[in-house]
Image (cartoon, rainbow, N blue to C red):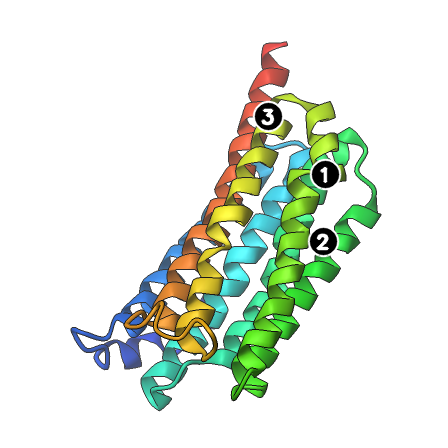
Amino acid sequence: MKSLLLSLPLLADVSKIANDDYVGFTFFVGCMAMMAASAFFFLSMNSFDRKWKTSILVSGLITFIAAVHYWYMRDYWAGVGESPTFFRYVDWTLTVPLMCVEFYLILKVAGAQKSLMWKLIFASVVMLVTGYFGEAVYTTGSGPALWGLISGIAYFYIVYEIWFGNAKKLAESAGGSVLKAHKTLCWFVLVGWAIYPIGYMAGTTGWYDGIFEGLNMDVIYNIGDAINKIGFGLVVYGAAVASQSSTSDS
């Protein structure tokens, strides 16, 4: 860990952040916040039993992967002055499926099957790949709007599955801290993940031109990442604490 931190080019680039460089600022703050969250999750793992330890580990991996990518995205922005689209989508392709895995892990106690996990992962990958096509490959004409629509359909499939599908039934059968955590994570997906389409529309062209004029795509994405990735982990951590407390009380 120490050698990794020393190798990252943070100190050399801090002076390059201008007072009005909100993109660079949010890259820097987002990286620090997610690195701190990773340390918190990793160090707290041994406080929980095996049932919750894996969930806490995944939470730490999500924020750690994001933090490392943010080091490089901040450096790319400082050096090139362009949105680090490729690095961002690599980050999302690793972390968003892991966020879907969290639903499976907390619902295992209610009998969740791996098929649920793979359905959510597949939908998340479709959402991200088509989003990348619209943002970085087919960037002219109707391309961004078309691929954004396909990405949105995959997103709403995830929303349907966790709010109304088998995932909801499993959460209700589990009850207690599991049900509470599931509901909170559902709200993160419905409201928190909705931040990303706003960023997408702010940075691409389509029928939505002018709606989000003046908003910076990277600032929106950076805020969304910090809220959702750290928030997901804190919800799982809270559920683990509540579950352990109820067990010790009984």
Image location (x, y in percent) of residue 28: 33, 67
Viewport quadrant of the C terminus: top right
The numbered mark, 3 or 2, whose residue comes first in the sequence reads 2
SS at mark 3 in the image: helix
Q: Regarding mark 1 in the picture, which secondary structure is present there? A: helix
- Point out the residue furthest to the left here: 19
Q: Dot 3 corresponds to which residue?
A: 177
Residue at the spot x=48%, y=48% of the render? Answer: 191
Q: Nearer the viewer, mark 1 or mark 3?
A: 1
What label sits on residue 228 in the rendered view? none
Q: Residue 126: where, in percent of width, then height?
A: 69, 67
User: Can you see residue 244?
Assistant: yes
Q: Residue at x 16, y 73 (%)?
A: 19
Q: Are marks 2 and 1 in contact (CB under 8 Å)?
A: yes
Residue 235 lies left or right of residue 19; in this view the side is right
Rendered residue at 23%/75% (across/down): 21
Mark 3: amino acid: Ser
Q: Which mark is residue 167?
A: 1
> Badge 3 local density, few (<14 within 10 Å), some, or many (20+)?
many
Measure the alpha-carbon separation of dots 3 and 2: 22 Å
Q: Quadrant of residue 183?
A: top right
Q: CA distance from mark 2 to mark 1?
A: 10 Å
Question: SS at mark 2?
Answer: helix
Q: Earlier in the sequence, mark 1 or mark 3?
A: 1
Q: Which residue is mark 2?
A: 120
Percent of width and height locating residue 121: 72, 58
Q: Is residue 5 visible?
A: no
